[in-house]
Amino acid sequence: MQSSLSGRSRQRRFLMCRPTYFDVTYAINTWMDPNVPVDTGLAIQQWTALREVYRSLGHEVLEIEPVPGLPDMVFAANGALVIDGRVLGAQFRAPQRAEEAPLYRSWFETAGYPVRTPKYVNEGEGDFVVTDRYVLAGTGFRTEHAAHAEAQEFFGRPVISLRLVDPRFYHLDTALFALDGENVAYFPGAFSEGSQRVLARLFPDALLVEEADAAVLGLNAVSDGHHVVLNAEAVTLAEALTERGYQPIPVDMSELRKAGGGPKCCTLEIRS
């Protein structure tokens, strides 16, 4: 499939990790159940289809080698935050994922990027969403609040702290995504009352998403400003995006969702 980029979209550069060793052998979020069988072959097929969607839209996809014993390494978004060609590495809260952090830092260092090893727990783009004016930062389940100040100091961009309160939405990128550089879509119920007021003030024209779509990780989506790659089950969200002039591109990520992941979890944007 070939598709030309819309005038509103911008070519992106993504880092991904093939789910060669994907499995659910532990539970570090409410989506994970080691008793539910995982089809790694199907996960690879779904991931490969996602990668090819990006390529068909004109985006560049780079890959980091998967490592045995790290089944969640496929969720590349958690590995770092990259803005203006500078990299803030990750530090994972769960010991099961700790070994991923130096692997992602090493990849960027080898590629020639300046990399900061963080002092505080942060899980990369899992809890940081970048817009033109702000870096939105989640806390409550994974990333420490102190990491928000660390990111602000490192990147020199205003960081807005948002508290997550529903364990289904353990990372910010499961509850909110940037539609473009100016606006976002989010599920209000994932946030504390104060954070809901902050979002309403900053983004009065935001797309508010229903719980049914959020509950299938419909907000774990990737937008290039026009095309929005999202979980196929988020039908109402797809309709709302179309009404606003975006082009939704549904994908099947059902196998990877067994670990609480979707399109965005598998996709780390390299912003230069």
Image (cartoon, rainbow, N blue to C red):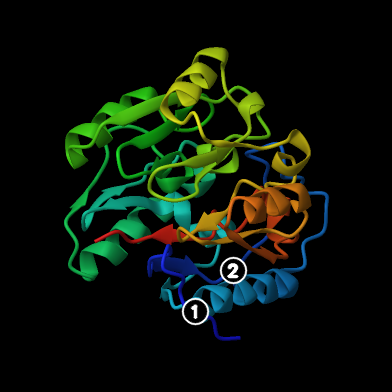
Front disc: 1 or 2: 1
Q: How far apart, in angstroms, are the residues tagged by discs 1 and 2?
A: 18 Å
Which secondary structure lies at badge 2? Answer: loop
- Mark 1–mark 2 CB contact (< 8 Å): no
Does the image show residue 63?
Answer: yes
Q: Residue furthest bottom?
A: 1
Question: Relative to 56, is 107 on the left or the right?
Answer: left
Callout 2: 10 Å neighbours few (<14), some, many (20+)? many
**In the figure, residue 154 lies in which quadrant?**
top left
Disc 1 designates what residue?
A: 55
Q: Amino acid at mark 2?
A: Pro
240 to 141, vertically: above or below? below
Q: Residue at x 19, y 62 (%)?
A: 113
Looking at the rendered image, the quarter that the N terminus falls into is bottom right
Disc 2 designates what residue?
A: 19
Residue 217 image position (x, y, % from top left): 68, 46
Residue 213 image position (x, y, % from top left): 74, 43
Q: Residue at x 26, y 31 (%)?
A: 158
Callout 1: 10 Å neighbours few (<14), some, many (20+)? some
Residue 261 image position (x, y, % from top left): 63, 52
The tag earlier along the polypeptide, 1 or 2, is 2
Looking at the rendered image, the quarter that the C terminus falls into is bottom left
109 to 197, vertically: above or below? below
146 to 101, vertically: above or below? above
Residue 179 image position (x, y, % from top left): 50, 49
Which secondary structure lies at badge 1? Answer: helix
Q: How many marks?
A: 2
Q: Amino acid at mark 1?
A: Arg
